[in-house]
Image (cartoon, helix red, strand yellow):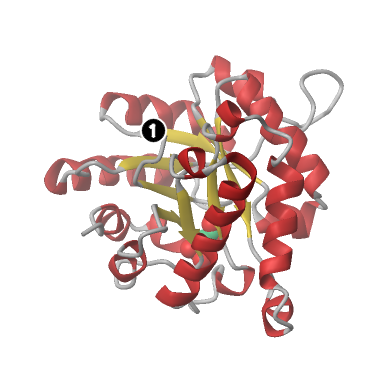
Amino acid sequence: MRKKIVAGNWKMNKNFQDAEDLMFEIVDELTEKGAGETEVIVCTPAVYLEMSSDIAAENGFMVGAQNLSQWESGAYTGEISAAMLHSMGITHSIVGHSERRTYFGETDKIISAKVDLALKYSITPIYCCGEVLAERQAEKHFDVVRSQVSEALFHLGKEAITEVVIAYEPVWAIGTGVTASSAQAQEMHAFIRSLLTEKYGADVSAEISILYGGSCNAKNAAELFANPDVDGGLIGGASLIAADFVSIVNSFS
Ligand code: PGA
């Protein structure tokens, strides 16, 4: 179902104590400022999921994983399965983040298997797509995103696709301090929604949340979120500061 969502992506940051402190700071900020209608998800490192999901559950928000395995179970040393996350009460996972594509060789085929396993175990995949700078400069960004979205998601049926959240994250904007302009974000989000409409029909595409990610912060979130096809954000750096994160949560007009 289409919702306003702000998801934090802590990436590989914080020791246990600092992570727990940050969770409680988020609780304090949310208690003070509220979250309106916005669904709040914090994607913490896997080793902190138990601690963070306990705190989140008591305080009305959610915790997600940053990744899950493309395999269901078995001899895959070091991997964490969708079934394991589900058994810990985890309801969301980022899937196909550009850092996983770049540093861990994840292809759309692998990511598509992860999406399937997430859905099988009732975990909402937050599917990331987006072009690198050279692709945008070569005006290939629409082709790149079309291919990522169709290869990883378009085997899904109408019901399954509405369980997916899509995050458009132009790689050149991630962690760089360079944000896509509000117009660039809206243009790509509308394009992604048009792909969904073409494949599944307007009723289905209207139900899917499309988040923006890439140097989204407390200063620029309101302008980005004011766009009709931007349903929220996937927030990296700014999610490590509780006040900034909760200010982004409250950036919808
Ligand atoms: P950033 O990261 O907000 O630090 O740019 C976003 C992301 O990678 O999800």
Identify the residue at the far right of this view.
75
Q: Which image quadrant for residue 125?
A: top right
Number of marks drawn: 1
Image quadrant containing the N terminus: top left
Point 64% across, 52% down: residue: 97
In the picture, measured across the screen, residue 225 lies left or right of residue 114, that is: left
Name which residue type carries label 1: Met
Q: Nearer the viewer, residue 200 or 90?
A: 200
On screen, residue 202 above or below 130: above
Q: Is residue 159 visible?
A: yes
On screen, residue 160 above or below 243: above
Point 60% across, 40% down: residue: 200
Point 27% across, 30% down: residue: 60
User: Which residue matches tag 1?
Assistant: 62
The x and y percentages for residue 173 are 55, 72
Identify the residue at the far top of this view.
87
Q: Nearer the viewer, residue 144 or 234?
A: 144
The x and y percentages for residue 224 are 36, 67
In the picture, measured across the screen, residue 244 lies left or right of residue 33, that is: right
Tell whether circle 1 marks a residue whose Cβ is less than 8 angstroms from ligand 1.
no
Identify the residue at the far left of this view.
32
Image quadrant containing the C terminus: bottom left
Q: Which image quadrant for residue 102?
A: bottom right
On screen, residue 126 above or below 70: below
